[in-house]
Image (cartoon, rainbow, N blue to C red):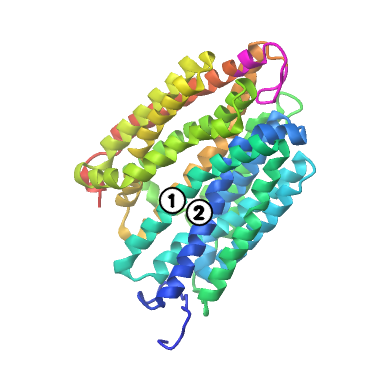
Amino acid sequence: MTGHTTPRIVAASSFRPGFCPENARRRILFAAILASALGFIDGTVVSIAMPAMRSSLEATLAEAQWINNAYLLSLSALMLVGGAAGDRFGLGRVFSIGIAVFIVASLASALAPNAETLIAARALKGIGAAAMIPGSLALIYRTYPKDERGRAIGLWAGASALTTALGPILGGAAITLLGDEAWRWLFAINLPLGLIAIWFVLSAVEDDRGDPSRGVDYLGAFLISLCLGMAAYALTGLGAETGTGAYVFGFLALMALGGFIIWEARVRDPMMPLSLFASLRFTSANLATFLLYLSLSAVLFFLPMTVIAGWGITEAEASAAFLPLTGFIALFSARVGRAADRIGPGILIAMGTAIVAAAFAGMALTAPMQAFWKATLPLMCLMGAGMCLVVAPLSTAVMGAVPEEQAGAASGINNAVSRIAGLVAIAAMGAVAASAYASAGGPDSFGAPSDLQGHADAMNAGFVAVAWVTAALAAAASLISWIGIRGRDQAG
């Protein structure tokens, strides 16, 4: 095997660290960084570009929600299956297929003539991301020897944070300079980047054997997809022509959830091992994750629409709101992680989520001032400081709450929970924003570009309602963390 110039990515049981040549490792690392960047940028760019997309496609608020949620739905429902498929059929193979699906869907998004086509393309993109994102870190883990993994993962995480920060800035600048239709180029650029990533993987991976003994929970994936889809449909009200329609879809979602839980308790290789939730700490960490990321996703989705369509802030200026989050996390997460090892993660998570709650409450109080640079951006900095106290300790709490051999499943569940929270946030908070907008006498639709009198004030009312709800959710996450995640024994 030493005569090969390219690595052989094999099943985890037969993988031997240090086996891959250094140049091949670099290609795999670069491919993983590119793939992660595609996935992370996609979410942040859409928030900035949403007003332009709505104007270009004449999309309603509900359609705008589904443009975002179609991606989150398929990604959150299939992410755990994507990781299992990589183990079963070969990491490099599934990773490359995921990128290919993602870039085809990106091209379809760029060419979409209407909102319905864009929603379908975004759903397909989420399927590709579900195969692509889990494989990026797994490839690094399997191709780098143990004593080099930390540095490689650090490079991957740092580059991902940088690209996530640059995404909204470049997207906002493009739309500000080139007009509303520039959002199409933001999707089209995924094509060359994705092809480069595929080339790097194919040139570095020669023998990509999976593990035939590993099962893939297809029925579980179907049931959770049905559950999340029906829940999102009920929350946005797209399927309800009468008041009872939302309740019907909500009931179907509960039925699918019940079937999913029963199936996961019986299947040999479950996508979500229910035994993990017997740990109070694991359950508390995931509940805190759900509440925190629900509040964060709602603010990051509705704030850009408010300042762009309501306050007249340009997309380039609005993109500055995303910088504190990635900046604080990139600069301080390593130090906070070391602190979590010393004192335990619970107190840090409780402090961080309390700070986030205070920032969102501040946004609710100051939104009527329409002071983006003097009030909103400083509060986003406060939110970023709170989040940097949460991210690393939350991972520590999740991993430390379960046996080491189940750490991978625990991490996958926690990642899926954060994305499901984003799906629920945008579906549910749309009703909150729209109701407050209408109650304030809004003449149009929340988030739609409009010069009609009273539109800006009604937009502020809609965002204030969202901000107060998210502040309450973040405060609840803080309380749950304080009660349910205690002690230093989490830190291992």
Label of residue 293 in the image: none
- From this viewpoint, which residue is outermost toward the front? 177
- Quarter in which the N terminus is drawn: bottom left
Q: Earlier along the polypeptide chain: callout 2 or callout 1?
A: 2
Of residues 302 and 221, the one nearer the viewer is 302
Going 76% across and 36% down the picture, which residue do you hit?
57
Label of residue 274 in the image: 1
Of residues 427 and 376, the one nearer the viewer is 376
Residue 389 x %, y %: 32, 38
The residue pinned by badge 2 equals: 264
Above or below: residue 303 compared with residue 39:
above
Residue 402 x %, y %: 32, 53
Residue 486 x %, y %: 25, 39
Residue 98 located within the stretch drawn in magenta? no
Q: Identify residue type, mark 2.
A: Glu
Residue 279 in sight in this render:
no
Q: Which residues are magenta?
A: 444-459
In the picture provided, is 317 more to the left or to the right than 287?
A: right
In the picture provided, is 200 more to the left or to the right than 181?
A: left
Residue 90 x %, y %: 53, 71
Going 40% across and 30% down the picture, which residue do you hit?
381
Residue 250 in sight in this render:
yes
Going 71% across and 48% down the picture, which residue do you hit?
109
Of residues 226 and 383, the one nearer the viewer is 383
**Element type at mark 2:** helix
